[in-house]
Image: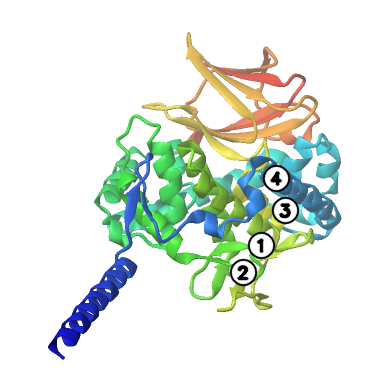
Amino acid sequence: MRKKIIPRILLLSLLYILIFIIIVAIQFPVKNRTDDGVIEDTSFNPRDFTIQQFQNSRDFIAAVSRWQDGNFIAWNRLISQQNDEDLVLAFAEESLNRSSYGAALTAIPAAFRNGNRRTYLSSVFLGQLSQTYRSLVTADQEMLNLLNKQLQEKSPDFLLEPDIFDFMVSRGLASQFNQAISLVKSMAPESVTLELCPAIFRWDMEFSDSDIENPFSHLIESAFQAVSESVRMNSDRNKVFAVSGESIDTVFNLRLGKELLGWAEIRKNDPWIALARSIIVSVLTLENYTGYIRAEYGITAEGEIREIPSSTANSTAKYYRILGLGEYSPRAVVLSSGDSHIWAWTAGRIGFSNANNIMDISVNFPVNETHYMIIRGVKPFTKIQLYNMDYRSDPQFERYDSSGWSYIAAEQILLVKMKHKAEDEHIRIFY
């Protein structure tokens, strides 16, 4: 009898040990560090949440191109009826890509051109610089006030602004830039939320290729953990999103997919490349070339995606601009840093030189098209040349079918209209 009991006890002991090992393995999964330094949880495999065809870059590019083609047709249909700056911007940018810019400008309704929905964003295409430059000054001041408040409160929420470090660099905000770097360095990895992940991926990628010590490197592992805990596929396994509760935020998911893709491509991390592509295409294919995507969708426990009728219908132009698909996207470009910090709001490709008391700004834009610029930080000068000829200032310069400029001395702002006789034109400022 005793001989039979002992083996049973041993068997039970072994069974309890096995159960304990399984529980520990579930709660504390094994982690492996990859070549690029990311610790990957072996219980999460990005390929398990990847749409198979988008492991191939050719299929991904083709899917995005189809989306561009379909939505450009939709924008052509909608542009005359809409008073939407995102739509105007995307339509103008894509028309430049397709050599149909003149027709696009004609199609933009007068209600938008002359209305109060216009800001400095579209001034690069539509002009009216004397009015719209004020919206740039106002927007910059509002952003600076918010940034200063967040830095003072030591809040990482400043990272939710997609281009915040670009804003600080282009505006010459050295003090705020240094404060922001210090704040990021002090962030605890456990404080990383899903909302911060797009910023962490983007700026970790950009700072890793700069002369500044990368302040984001210690947050990357936590960012991947946050994403892995949020990713869900639908029941048909043809869409994947980062989900908060039962909510799919489409703008956030597109930003996450874009920044994760940029990070993973630099690191040559194929599993995360495939997942990022899958997230991007999943967002884009929520609409069928109608010109709209809802800001929010729901997803059930079973993986069924459902529309939320009360959710805002965003123009697909907003998503086009998030992905940066246009070659001539409006942006801030630093021309000169240091004591004489000069930057331009432009849609052209810009070059800059300063020698012998002559500041030379080269601008590349399609031939026979007109381009507008707002240049800030320009100190008072003696004259300006366009096309190698002296040009006099004229407050009414935009009324004429020619190039021209005006200068707001109190704010050191130069407003320029340039009709491109050649792709590369020059603005020469003499001191």
Residue at screen point 55% across, 79% down = 301
Secondary structure under tag 3 reads: helix
Tell me whether circle 1 and circle 2 mark residues in contact (CB < 8 Å): yes
Please name whichever residue, 35 or 192, is drawn nearer the observer in this view of the structure. Answer: 35
Residue 158 image label: none
Say which element carries label 4. Answer: helix
What residue is pinned by disc 2? 234
Contact? badges 3 and 2 (CB < 8 Å)? no
Element marked by disc 2: loop
Q: CA distance from mark 3 to mark 1?
A: 28 Å
Name the residue beneath numbered marker 3: 87
Residue 93 spot, x, y in % from top left: 72, 41
Answer with mark 3 or mark 4, whichever residue precedes in sequence: 4
Sequence-earlier tag: 3 or 1: 3
Q: Is residue 285 left or right of residue 263?
A: right
**236 vs 310: above or below:** above
Q: Is residue 94 above or below residue 199?
A: above
